[in-house]
Image (tube, grey):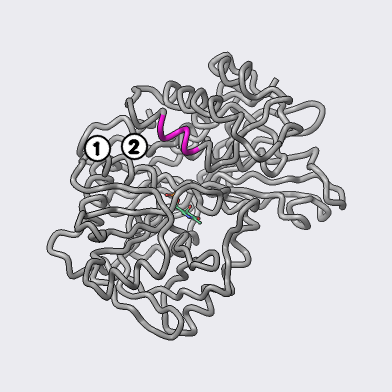
Amino acid sequence: MMMIGSSFLVYTAANFTRKSVPPPISRFMAGYSISFCKTFHNGLFHQIRKSLVGVANLAHTSSHDYSTAVSDGTFKASDLQVKLAKPDQLQKKPDVGNLIFGKCFTDHMFTAEWEKPTGWGPPKISPLEPLRIHPAAKVLHYAIELFEGMKAYRGSDGKIRLFRPDLNMIRLLQGARRSMLPSFDPLEFVECMKRLIKIEEEWIPHSETSSLYIRPTFIGTDPSLGVALSNHAMLFVILCPVGPYFATGFKPVSLFADPSYVRAWPGGCGDTKLGANYAPTVFVQKTAEAAGLQQVLWLYGEDNQLTEVGTMNIFVFMKNEKGERELITPPLNGLILPGVTRQSILDLAREWKDFKVTERTITMKEVIQAQKEKRLLEVFGAGTACIVCPVSAISFQGTKYDIPTSEQESPVYQKFLKQLSDIYYGHISHPWGVLVD
Ligand SMILES: Cc1ncc(COP(=O)(O)O)c(C=O)c1O
């Protein structure tokens, strides 16, 4: 039995027994978006449950078998043990204008620990402190670790909202399964995070260009060497207030596209947020910077398929050969992280029906051809950190190709930015904005 929460009966009984064969993330998210975007449900529970039911229909198409995935009950928000920091432990709130991403943390953190065979211990909120783990802990040797990146926004109405946390929970649980870490009830976890956010409410900037970054992290803490599943695990959450991503306005970025570096490959786990996917990218990012470029455009295959940009999903907006305006992003084929922003951009664009929207492979050859024929309109990255990030140039095989993203009269990337910001900050009431109450 994977989950104990009665709210997950469909999920539990039908799809997540030890014998079930879950689909890889790409199919999972594809099923998710199909089932979810057709109807907007009011509660988080309905959103997650519906998406998980959608997954069941794809299970038989899986090429992976994680059937031995660990599955042991859940912790519950009602069991939360809260220990607040003493007044002298509270830090001074920073000036949001000067915040550097990821360097400033709030006063409290969430932790929950799991052990085989006893299962999940009580979830805890306590003052932020260094972790105590054994030097042999599997996370330190075999990188049994995954994480999420989400945000809480303070709206114009003073209310605090999360954005589509159900999608983060799905991605987290899929990554946990790929890492053989235990599952938990995602609704209970979201409730625990809401409690933490409420406690840290004053850390959420009173600004519509800022937010509170949420970093759920899941590690294998088994104190033993040997590449094997971890019989001990820890789930924790830390929070950072973050200022505007582009402090001095939108600055388009230039991209370094070198096919000799590959971020993800078929059968790998580039479609999960395992920390192991990120360590090897730092070297390539530094190589890009040494070449005077700002981000890495990750290519794949003999035909140089565009896959992702830095730690963002990529979108290309162009006039196709038939003269139609088309928004293209690579499909969730196992090489692509199923981004929450990516999914939201696709969902919005399909709702607007202003132009063709396609999830398909796009190669450098096609981008260069469109650029030469002046059909290429915009290239942009998409992710929780920056929302959208316009691209001004791609450097590939010795040539710098200029991209006219910022030269468009009313670029589509700005329309997505506006619509998403309106949802984050509660300017419009939307089921994707989940209240922290
Ligand atoms: C590799 C990669 N692609 C895409 C994204 C964007 O995902 P999201 O929109 O969920 O932030 C991220 C950020 O988490 C990422 O690390």
Q: Is residue 336 left or right of residue 251?
A: right
Find residue 327 and report its horizontal and vertical position in percent. 29, 53
Q: What residue would you read off at disc 1?
A: 351
Asked if 15 appears above or below 252 in the picture, the reply is above
Q: Residue at x 21, y 55 (%)?
A: 325
Q: Quadrant of the C terminus?
A: top left
Q: Residues within 10 Å of mark 1 (few under 14, many from 20)?
A: few
Q: What residue would you read off at disc 2?
A: 160
List the single residue furthest toward the left.
Answer: 409
Q: Does the segment drawn in magenta span residue 146?
A: no
Nearer the observer, 17 or 183: 17
Instruction: Report the amino acid beneath label 1.
Output: Glu
Q: Quadrant of the N terminus?
A: top right
Specify start and end residues of the magenta stretch as a single range.
Answer: 29-34
Instruction: Report the amino acid beneath label 2.
Output: Ile
* SS category of the residue bearing label 2: strand
Q: Is residue 47 left or right of residue 142?
A: left
Nearer the observer, 85 or 115: 115
Q: CA distance from mark 2 to mark 1?
A: 26 Å
